[in-house]
Amino acid sequence: MKKTFKISGMTDDTCARRIERFVKKMEGVDTASVNMAADTLRVSYNSTLTDEHNIEDTVILAGYSIIHPEPGMLPSE
């Protein structure tokens, strides 16, 4: 599965690297990439091992917030 998350609270590349590091350590996550300009996190993961709620919890644990945009505001999966 692939999912894009809108992130709040990032101020620089250190923040982006921190989020990527936290999420990449999760079981079932294949890739995690932050786009600072768009304030997004793109994750590819195995849905039998983790889900979007666990990924959101990990981002929050790293010290950032998830923004839940209106439907259609992020690219289609």
Image (tube, rainbow, N blue to C red):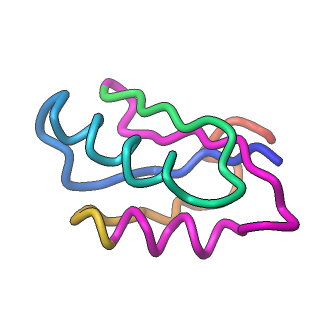
Q: Is residue 57 left or right of residue 13?
A: right
| Residue at 34 percent of width and 48 percent of height | 19
Q: Splitting the image into 4 quarters, where does residue 35 fall?
A: top left
Q: Is residue 27 left or right of residue 32?
A: right
Q: Splitting the image into 4 quarters, where does residue 50 fall?
A: bottom right
Magenta segment: 37-60
**Image quarter hosting the C terminus:** top right
| Residue at 66 percent of width and 49 percent of height | 29
Place of residue 39 in the rendered image (x, y in percent of width and height, measured from the top left): 36, 38
Residue at the far right in the pictured view? 48
Place of residue 42 in the rendered image (x, y in percent of width and height, measured from the top left): 58, 38
11 or 76, which is in the foreground? 11
50 or 60, which is in the foreground? 50
Up-down relation of residue 37 to residue 75 (above or below) = above
Place of residue 46 in the rendered image (x, y in percent of width and height, measured from the top left): 81, 54
Q: Is residue 25 left or right of residue 13?
A: right
Up-down relation of residue 39 to residue 25 (above or below) = above
Q: Is residue 44 magenta?
A: yes
4 or 68, which is in the foreground? 4
Up-down relation of residue 4 to residue 31 (above or below) = below
Q: Is residue 13 left or right of residue 5?
A: left
22 or 65, which is in the foreground? 22
Q: Is residue 24 magenta?
A: no
Q: How many marks?
A: 0
Place of residue 21 in the rendered image (x, y in percent of width and height, measured from the top left): 37, 44
| Residue at 78 percent of width and 39 percent of height | 76
